Image: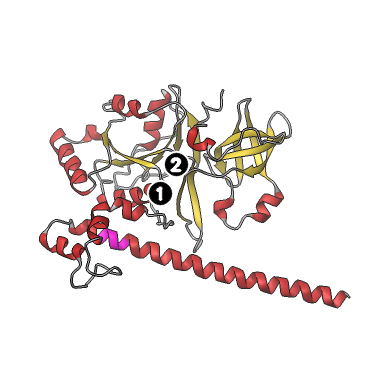
Amino acid sequence: MTLENLGLNESALEFINLDDLQGLELGRVIVEHKERYIVQTVDGSYQAEITGSLRYSAESRADFPAVGDWVKISVLDEDSAIIIEVLPRFSSLERQAVGRSGDTQIIASNVDTAFIVQAVGHDFNLNRLERYLAISHSASITPVIVLSKIDLIPSDELEKLKTQIHNRIPNVPVLAISNETEAGYDELKDLLKRGQSYCVLGSSGVGKSSLTNNLLHNAKMEVSDISSSTSKGRHTTSHRELIILPEGGIIIDTPGMRELGIASEAGGIEQTFDQITELTRNCKFNDCTHTEEVGCAVLEALESGELDAASFENYHKLMREQAHFSSTIAERREKDKKMGKLYKRIQQEKYNKRK
C-alpha cells in the first residue's frame, strides 16, 4: 500500500505537507458510520474516533470527518486510533443536510470525478441530472453521466436518450453501460487513472453498487433491483465507503439519495446552465431576474425556441432553492452569534458574583 494507492495526487498535495505530520500518521477515511470511522494508512486500517476538542470546535456537521478525507491520526494499538486533525479538502461534494435546516452534509471529499448514474428506464430524468451536475460543478469535480441498464431497451431508444442529454447538456461526456453484460465497461475503465478518486452518485436501484462490484471483479457491495410495484429503487448501500480498485484508482460508493438539496454558492448552477449564463451577459439590465424584464436576452431566447423551456424552468427552481438555503444559513449564523453573546454574558455574570 502506498499513499498514491490511497489517492494522494497533486491536487491533494496542494493542501497536505508530508513534512509536517509531527509524529502522527497520515491516513484517509474509507468508511464513515454514525461518527465512527475506518482510516486506511500505508501500514494498515484502524477503527477511529475523533478527539473531544475536534468535536467541540466543529461549527457544523461539515467539519466532521467524511469519507475521502485525509486525516492525521494517533495510533493507539494495532486496531484503533484517534483522529487528531481533518486536513483541508481540495473538493467537497455537499448537499443540504436532511432534517437540519441551514446545515450541509458532506457526501464525499477529495474527489476528482463524479459518475452520475441514471437507469435508462424509470429513473431517467434530465432535471435530476442537472441537479447532480450543479452539485458536482460547485465542488469543482468533473462530472461524467453514466446511463445504466442499457440491456433493457432497444438501441434506437438509447440513442434518443443520448440525443436528449446532448441537446440540453452538451458539454458533459455520456457513457452507456450494462452491469449484466458489461457492455460499455471498456470505455468506463479507460477513464480510471491511478491516484485519482471517483465517486458514484445516483438514486437507489440504478446500478451503482453493481458498477462498483464489476470494477472490483467481485460482489463486495450489496445490490438490489428496482421495485416492480413502485418503480423506485430499494436502498442497498447504507453507508459511504472508499474502495481501492485493482487496476488503480479509488472509487467511493454512496447510498441512494432521493433528496439532494443545493447547498453551495460556488457557481455550480451557472456552470451547469452555461447557455443561460452566456445569454445573461446580453441582458439590458445588470440585475435582470430573467422573469419579466424588457430587454432580457434569456426570455428572448426562450420565446424564439433557442433555449429549452424545461431547462430554463429547472434553472430558476435551483436558483430559488440556493437563495433560500443561503438565507437560512445567514439566519442561523445570526442566531448562533446571539446565543454566543448570551453565553458570554451569563458566564461574566457568574464570574462577577463569585468576586
Q: Is residue 147 above or below residue 307?
A: above
Residue 97: x and y in percent read: 48, 56
Tell me the SS state at disc 1: loop
Q: In the drawing, what numbered circle is on residue 303?
A: none
Q: Name the chief secondary structure element in magenta.
A: helix
Give, as a single range, the part of the protein colored magenta: 313-317
Compared across the picture, whether 272 is left or right of 67 comes to: left
Q: What residue is pinned by disc 2?
A: 254
Quarter where residue 206 is shown: top left
Going by the numbered disc 1, the residue's amino acid type is: Met
Q: What residue is pinned by disc 1?
A: 257
Residue 264: x and y in percent read: 43, 56
Please rate how many residues cluster around mark 2, counting C-alpha atoms within 10 Å: few if below 14, some from 14 to 19, many from 20: many
Residue 316 painted magenta: yes
Please rate how many residues cluster around mark 1, counting C-alpha atoms within 10 Å: few if below 14, some from 14 to 19, many from 20: few
Q: Nearer the viewer, residue 47 or 8?
A: 8
